[in-house]
């Protein structure tokens, strides 16, 4: 299950990464109503003819935001030493609430895609149910471009205690290198055991304390590289990014979650211990930077 | 260990640990800032942290006193455990009292024999004394549950925690994955799966008081969260953070739309099983 690590493949990945992350031609956000990233740059997406739907399609996954939804700042994406990514919590304006936590919950995370990836919103991106008007294709260049954008607290019907209003998306959406399903490997974020495989979910429980639970959604479930009970090492292949979501496909992306036990205080000051969803964005940023720097996820 | 893996607030762009957390969009801006305190936190934040720490200490003492009362009730003659049960030292929040469901009135007719547990702080913050009481209560079904679910005996014996299983025949087979201080049980239902996990409180991470959690814990710190594919309930019992999760194959499966089924599963989670490592940790021999 070791990922291919040939020099040729590494060179291709590096070339794609460099092409996508060229700091000499920084991208600026568009002036679209959603404040999404600008088109241009990045690899040419591959259009696929399918019934992908272009949106996560359970009836209540894209709840309208209320009038008191806090506005998110727009403006140019901050530049970093490595690749362009917006701040943690800086979600698309009007798409949900923010969050205060700035913890890197998995400091040694292996970036969960073997290819390059684009962290951004599925629902509020091009082709999404709440995407920009006129941009109806999930394969639009807007979605395959920098900067990265957090969508952990995007408005959904799911519990997310870390988010300001207690609800959110529970994970981060990441598109693979191009708009092609069943092509790009999804890899283990940490050494652990595959403890559950559902109809469109794979759960990896880390072997080392604090035993983070990583959940991967929407992989090509008919073509997984693992079975429940398999022990895996960080960087091992799990399967391929796709659009599986029960009977109705979603967009081609990986929904990636980190869960663990945390203790803290509730909004009304009461102590609480719970197992919950933690913002993966900063861990992913660090992991991606390490990937761009050529750091391997495993030593084998 | 509690904080080693979560090195505290880190700014988004630099990933260095030496700056104060930035207020996220959508939150009120930080007040005018006096000189930062440790970790770059403001005096207001530090004061709030101190207040919460005091609340945690008070809650710990209250839970310990509650646990002591229950132990005294259960061991009226044979147990010397009338002194307060030792509070977890590594856990940030007190071990709450066991649930009413796990203490049916009159269930122990003659009273259990004295425990031989250690007198010092419980290993890993686990309240083995209370867990042992419930393990005895379910002794008639525990071994049968392990056998009936075809759980791997080696994994059971490796688990140094009280393993919680479901009372009632909802599932007829399950897989146990154990890391010693953490376990995960996966079981299949028609069109869904159940996951049961247990972890020491020592392995939980502390979230800064500057990041309040929008949660409303119930008894046993139970919090139920709707997930993309189901319902997740977590609760603290015996000083262990347990989860019961229901995951449905179809996003529109009614069992996963509301919390009724997962709450029923939590209510059924009363079968306590000790493997060899747990018995040793409880002072009950291997």
Image (spheres, helix red, strand yellow):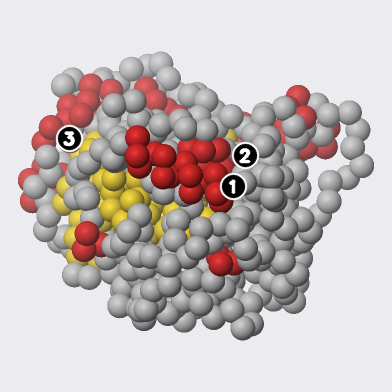
Which residue corresponds to mark 3?
B155
Q: CA distance from mark 1 to mark 2?
A: 8 Å
Q: Chain of mark 2?
A: A
Which sits in the foreground, B158 or A252?
A: A252
Coordinates of residue B141 in the picture (x, y in percent): 13, 48
Mark-to-mark CA distance, 1 and 3 = 46 Å
Residue with the mark numbered 1? A21
The image quadrant of residue B255 is bottom left
Q: Is residue B204 above or below residue A134?
A: above
> Left of A247 or right of it: where is A157?
right
Is circle 1 on the same chain as circle 3?
no
- Specify the label residue B93 is tagged with: none
Within 10 Å of the Cα at label 2, are there few (<14), some (14-19), or many (20+) other Cα atoms?
some
Which residue is located at x 67 percent, y 37 percent?
Answer: A81
Disc 2: which residue: A82
Q: Secondary structure at mark 1?
A: loop
Instruction: Count neighbours of disc 3 (C-alpha within 10 A) and say few if under 14, some if 14 to 19, many if 20 or more.
Output: some
Say whether disc 1 or disc 2 marks the residue closer to the N-terminus.
1
């Amino acid at each position: 299950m070791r990922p291919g690590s040939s020099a040729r493949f590494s060179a291709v990945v590096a070339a794609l990464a460099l092409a996508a992350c060229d700091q000499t031609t920084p991208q600026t956000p568009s002036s679209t109503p959603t404040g999404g990233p600008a088109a241009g740059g990045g690899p040419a997406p591959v259009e696929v003819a399918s019934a992908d739907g272009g949106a996560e399609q359970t009836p209540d996954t894209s709840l309208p935001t209320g009038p008191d939804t806090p506005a998110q700042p727009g403006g140019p994406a901050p530049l970093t030493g490595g690749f362009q990514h917006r701040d943690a919590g800086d979600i698309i304006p009007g798409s949900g609430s923010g969050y205060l936590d700035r913890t890197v919950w998995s400091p040694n995370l292996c970036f969960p895609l073997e290819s390059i990836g684009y962290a951004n919103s599925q629902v509020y991106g091009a082709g999404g149910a709440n995407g920009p008007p006129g941009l109806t294709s999930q394969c639009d260049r807007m979605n395959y471009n920098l900067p990265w954008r957090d969508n952990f607290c995007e408005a959904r019907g799911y519990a997310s205690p870390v988010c300001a209003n207690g609800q959110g998306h529970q994970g981060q959406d990441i598109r693979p290198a191009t708009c092609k399903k069943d092509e790009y490997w999804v890899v283990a974020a940490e050494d652990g055991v595959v403890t559950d495989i559902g109809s469109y979910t794979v759960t990896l429980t880390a072997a080392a304390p604090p035993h983070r639970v990583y959940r991967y959604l929407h992989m090509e479930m008919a073509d997984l590289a693992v079975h429940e009970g398999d022990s895996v090492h960080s960087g091992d292949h799990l399967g391929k990014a796709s659009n599986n979501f029960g009977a109705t496909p979603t967009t081609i992306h990986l929904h990636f979650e980190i869960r663990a036990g945390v203790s803290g205080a509730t909004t009304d000051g009461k102590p609480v211990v719970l197992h919950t969803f933690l913002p993966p964005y900063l861990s992913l940023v660090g992991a991606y930077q390490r990937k761009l720097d050529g750091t391997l996820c495993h030593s084998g | 260990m509690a904080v080693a893996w979560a090195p505290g607030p880190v700014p988004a762009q630099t990933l260095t640990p030496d700056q104060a957390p930035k207020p996220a969009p959508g939150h009120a801006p930080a007040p005018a800032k006096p000189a930062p305190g440790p970790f770059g936190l403001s005096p207001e934040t530090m004061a709030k942290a101190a207040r919460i720490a005091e609340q945690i200490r008070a809650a710990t003492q209250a839970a310990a006193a509650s646990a002591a009362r229950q132990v005294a009730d259960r061991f009226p003659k044979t147990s010397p455990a009338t002194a307060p049960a030792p509070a977890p030292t590594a856990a940030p929040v007190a071990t709450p009292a066991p649930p009413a469901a796990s203490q049916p009135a009159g269930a122990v007719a003659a009273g259990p024999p004295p425990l031989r547990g250690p007198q010092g702080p419980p290993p890993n913050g686990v309240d083995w004394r209370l867990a042992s009481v419930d393990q005895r209560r379910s002794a008639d079904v525990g071994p049968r549950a392990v056998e009936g679910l075809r759980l791997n005996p080696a994994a059971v014996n490796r688990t140094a925690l009280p393993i919680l299983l479901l009372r009632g025949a909802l599932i007829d087979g399950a897989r146990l994955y154990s890391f010693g201080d953490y376990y995960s049980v996966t079981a299949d239902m028609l069109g869904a799966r159940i996951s049961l996990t247990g972890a020491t409180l020592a392995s939980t991470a502390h979230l800064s008081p500057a990041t309040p959690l929008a949660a409303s814990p119930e008894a046993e710190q139970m919090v139920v969260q709707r997930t993309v594919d189901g319902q997740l309930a977590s609760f603290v019992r015996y000083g262990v953070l347990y989860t019961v999760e229901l995951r449905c194959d179809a996003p529109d499966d009614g069992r996963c739309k509301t919390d009724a089924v997962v709450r029923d599963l939590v209510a059924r989670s009363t079968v306590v099983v000790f493997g060899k490592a747990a018995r040793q940790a409880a002072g009950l021999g291997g």
